[in-house]
Image: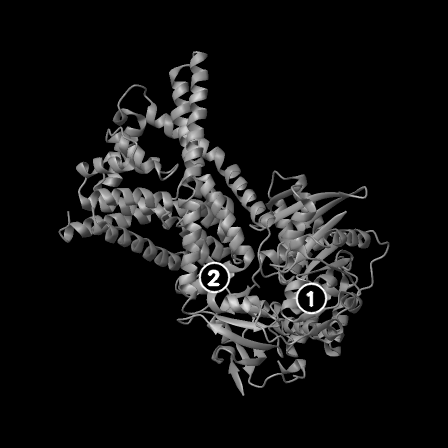
């Protein structure tokens, strides 16, 4: 089951499947550790469509909804994703 | 020996740097960048060490200024050793940067900080195993307590003095990728680049089509043209030659890149694959040195965030924090400001007495007392407030709260197309525009930074609010005053929003910059980490502004006291006011108001005292001056004056700060012109709109 990160509710966890779009934003996400296979947890959302607080790799990140929408996650928790490079 | 200190933001880099260099440090800017450059000289074992604190960065690509500065320093200055600070509580992302550094420079020592924080969130790290896994020396440090810092440095010196580069474990890329890297390496190994940079790194960056590499290539292989340029610098022929060379140079590997692209290996694809491989490698070696315990108890950051970032409580808490900061910096510190004023007055008296004793001419005494000391004193009186504010700013930034404020304020900033980090800068401006403008440094995107800088002067600072409330109280007594004040603030906020959208077009900010911001774990900043930047920022402000303030004070004095012995309206300033009356007339302003407006440029709070002199009120109290104004103006005119006064021009100190922070005379001039034109247009609309609606 694939959803965007923005569709997750607070407290839900999911693994990154891929990141849509490219350029600086994607690079930035990679630098912050958002790469396929990484488990993310939505901790809370700021009210009125504000940014989301996300936990990954033991630290916290704030991201806007627009940016979260670019991250496609798969619903399963902690599934070892086999990295096949050509699949992206 | 040159040592560079590198690491992610918030890893305690500056703590280590301050502990090692003490007061023996120099702070400036990187050439052409608004990124702070901090260097210090240390003497140890008969060795002069230049320690450079590189800006905190997450990666060594070429997307942000911090990344470019860090990378270029390592590439061009070639430090003997890199001290890499690593946050133990966040080891995976920190090691990602370390792996990138290792590809660039093999002489690296890792400083493992925040082990205590890691332990409290159930992470136990084995430093020896980490060292083995990467084949890099690792030193455990507790930066906040000063433990291990000395050992960190001596280890760095030891590695720096090694005869041969240590053999670092390379990141293994998947075989498909490794083939492509090797093919690129083969193409590049005979070029002049290979002698300048590590070959593998060069190949990786070439595959990623790194924009910086292209530029460097040109400067590397076109030394003749630059020499020519120097030789006959009188003519522009150098440029034509340069251009020609640019056309000839074809970066090696273009064909290879094209063929890869046909196979689906685009630039994005490569970038992702490299990042992916690095993270994969990290997670492979991770179990060797990390044991994770499952803690039932939520961490300190978890429990604090439950309140601080709560959708309900977050905002009241933020308002409380900001109120406390403002109260302490701008209201409770008032006696300090007064003490400075009194000190200045005493010094002026002393000097004047001295001049009297030496029979100096009267105009010289007047210059000293009414010109230099009165003008400079008015600005200096505000320095304690700015300093206290900077201290709070450093505390909030270091503790991790500032990022939370950006998180909470981001929704509002999003409306204006700005970044969440602009929020604190704009809020600071209610205290004083100078720290507000300086706070834009936390923004990464230069265009966002510029836009925020240009918006700041539209926000009324405490001195302006003081003058405004005195005038409001005189013209609109009782509860009506509060409503008037509120309406003024609403006008300011509305204009900030509209201007933000306008500035985006002017600055040509097309992309919304990414709001992907780390929320660091909370921790208590050390005293040194708060006081040192406070001192430095205050000092920088004074150093930048004093010449301008002095010059402006003298000019104001000259204009308002010559020709000597005539009433105010026949001085040069009075003439200037009459001359400027044509601008003020459509808004109902007489020459007195225009003079006050012109003189408000040095320091906005002097506007009232200027008006006091012009209206012939001797009293110093702002209330009585404002009372005198009521006789001369209708409430509508007063309201128009308030609006224009609130918006019309950033004060001298903030203009100087804008210039230094933006590094551009053009944008500074644009900012001034924008404010002036906007304020008079809005004033005109209010004055004539008010008249049409039948207000007086």
Where, by quadrant of the figure, is residue A60 drawn? bottom right
Q: In the rendered structure, find residue B592 and report the number of the disc placed on it.
A: none
Residue at mark 1:
B95
Q: Is residue B439 above or below residue B342?
A: below
Residue at 66% of width from left, 44% of height from top? B22
Label 1: how many Cα within 10 Å (few below 14, some 14–19, many 20+): many
* Chain at tag 1: B
Alpha carbon separation for disc pair 2 and 1: 26 Å
Q: Position of residue A41 (x, y in %)?
A: 55, 76
Residue at 23% of width from left, 50% of height from top? B686
Where, by quadrant of the figure, is residue B352 drawn? top left
Q: Position of residue B555 (x, y in %)?
A: 40, 29
Which residue lies most toward the left here? B694
In depth, the one of B5 and B243 nearer the eye is: B5
Look at the numbered disc 1 and give the secondary structure of its residue.
helix
In depth, the one of B372 and B687 nearer the eye is: B372
Name the colouring of the figure.
one colour
| Residue B273 appearing in the image | yes
B158 left or right of B545 in image: right
Residue at 28% of width from left, 42% of height from top? B470
């Amino acid at each position: 089951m694939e959803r965007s990160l923005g569709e997750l509710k607070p407290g839900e966890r999911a693994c990154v499947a891929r990141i849509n779009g490219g350029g600086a934003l994607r690079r930035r996400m990679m630098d912050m550790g958002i790469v396929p296979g990484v488990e993310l947890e939505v901790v809370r959302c700021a009210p009125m469509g504000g940014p989301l607080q996300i936990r990954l790799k033991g630290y916290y990140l704030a991201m806007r909804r627009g940016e979260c929408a670019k991250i496609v996650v798969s619903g399963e928790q902690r599934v070892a994703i086999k990295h096949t490079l050509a699949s992206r | 020996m040159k040592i560079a200190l590198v690491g992610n933001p918030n890893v305690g880099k500056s703590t280590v740097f301050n502990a090692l260099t003490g007061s023996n440090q120099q702070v400036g800017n990187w050439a052409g960048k608004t990124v702070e450059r901090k260097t210090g000289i240390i003497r140890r074992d008969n060795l002069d060490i230049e320690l450079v604190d590189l800006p905190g960065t997450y990666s060594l690509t070429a997307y942000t200024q911090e990344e470019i500065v860090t990378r270029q320093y390592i590439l061009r200055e070639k430090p003997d050793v890199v001290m890499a600070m690593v946050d133990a509580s966040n080891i995976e992302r920190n090691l990602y940067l370390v792996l990138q550094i290792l590809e660039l420079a093999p002489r690296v020592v890792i400083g493992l900080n925040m082990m205590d924080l890691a332990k409290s969130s159930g992470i136990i790290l084995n430093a020896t195993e980490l060292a083995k896994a990467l084949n890099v020396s690792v030193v455990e440090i507790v930066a906040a307590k000063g433990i291990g810092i000395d050992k960190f440095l001596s280890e760095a010196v030891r590695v720096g003095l090694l005869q041969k580069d240590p053999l670092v474990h390379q990141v293994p890329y998947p075989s498909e990728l490794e083939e492509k890297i090797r093919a690129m390496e083969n193409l590049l190994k005979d070029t002049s680049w290979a002698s300048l940079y590590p070959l593998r790194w060069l190949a990786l960056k070439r595959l990623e089509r790194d924009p910086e590499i292209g530029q460097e290539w040109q400067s590397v292989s076109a030394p003749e043209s630059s020499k020519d340029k120097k030789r006959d610098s009188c003519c522009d022929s150098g440029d034509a030659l340069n251009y020609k060379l640019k056309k000839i140079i074809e970066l090696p590997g273009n064909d290879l890149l094209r063929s890869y692209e046909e196979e689906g290996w685009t630039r994005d694809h490569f970038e992702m694959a490299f990042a992916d491989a690095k993270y994969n490698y990290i997670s492979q070696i991770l179990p060797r040195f990390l044991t994770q315990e499952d803690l039932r108890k939520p961490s300190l950051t978890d429990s604090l965030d439950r309140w601080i970032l709560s959708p309900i409580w977050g905002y009241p808490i933020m308002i409380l924090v900001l109120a406390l900061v403002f109260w302490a910096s701008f209201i409770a510190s008032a006696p300090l400001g007064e003490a400075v004023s009194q000190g200045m007055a005493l010094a002026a008296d002393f000097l004047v007495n001295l001049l009297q004793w030496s029979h100096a001419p009267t105009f010289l005494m007047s210059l000293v007392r009414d010109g230099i000391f009165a003008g400079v004193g008015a600005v200096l009186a505000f320095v304690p407030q700015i300093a206290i504010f900077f201290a709070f700013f450093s505390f909030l930034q270091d503790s991790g709260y500032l990022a939370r404020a950006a998180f909470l304020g981001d929704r509002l900033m999003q409306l204006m197309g700005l970044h969440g980090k602009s929020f604190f800068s704009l809020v600071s401006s209610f205290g004083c525009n100078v720290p507000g403008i300086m706070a834009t440094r936390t923004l990464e995107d230069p265009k966002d930074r510029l836009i925020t800088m240009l918006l700041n002067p539209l926000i009324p600072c405490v001195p302006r609010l003081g003058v405004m409330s005195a005038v409001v109280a005189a013209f609109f007594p009782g509860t009506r005053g509060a409503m008037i004040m509120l309406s003024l603030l609403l006008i300011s906020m509305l204009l900030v929003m509209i201007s933000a959208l306008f500035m985006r077009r002017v600055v040509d900010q097309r992309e919304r910059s990414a709001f992907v911001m780390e929320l660091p774990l909370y921790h208590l900043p050390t005293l040194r980490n708060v006081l040192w930047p406070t001192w430095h920022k205050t000092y920088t402000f004074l150093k930048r502004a004093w010449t301008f303030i002095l010059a402006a004070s003298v000019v104001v004095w000259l204009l308002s006291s010559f020709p000597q012995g005539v009433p105010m309206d026949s001085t040069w300033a009075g003439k200037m006011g009459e001359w400027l009356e044509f601008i003020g007339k459509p808004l109902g302003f007489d020459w007195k108001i225009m003079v006050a407006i012109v003189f408000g440029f040095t320091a906005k709070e002097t506007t009232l005292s200027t008006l006091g002199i012009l209206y012939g009120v001797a009293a110093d109290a702002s209330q009585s001056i404002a009372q005198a104004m009521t006789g001369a103006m209708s409430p509508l005119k007063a309201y128009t004056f308030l609006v224009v006064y609130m918006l019309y021009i950033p004060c001298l100190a903030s203009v100087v700060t804008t210039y230094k922070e933006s590094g551009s005379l053009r944008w500074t001039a644009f900012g001034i012109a924008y404010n002036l034109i906007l304020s008079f247009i809005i004033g005109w609309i209010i004055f004539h709109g008010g008249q049409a609606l039948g207000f007086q």
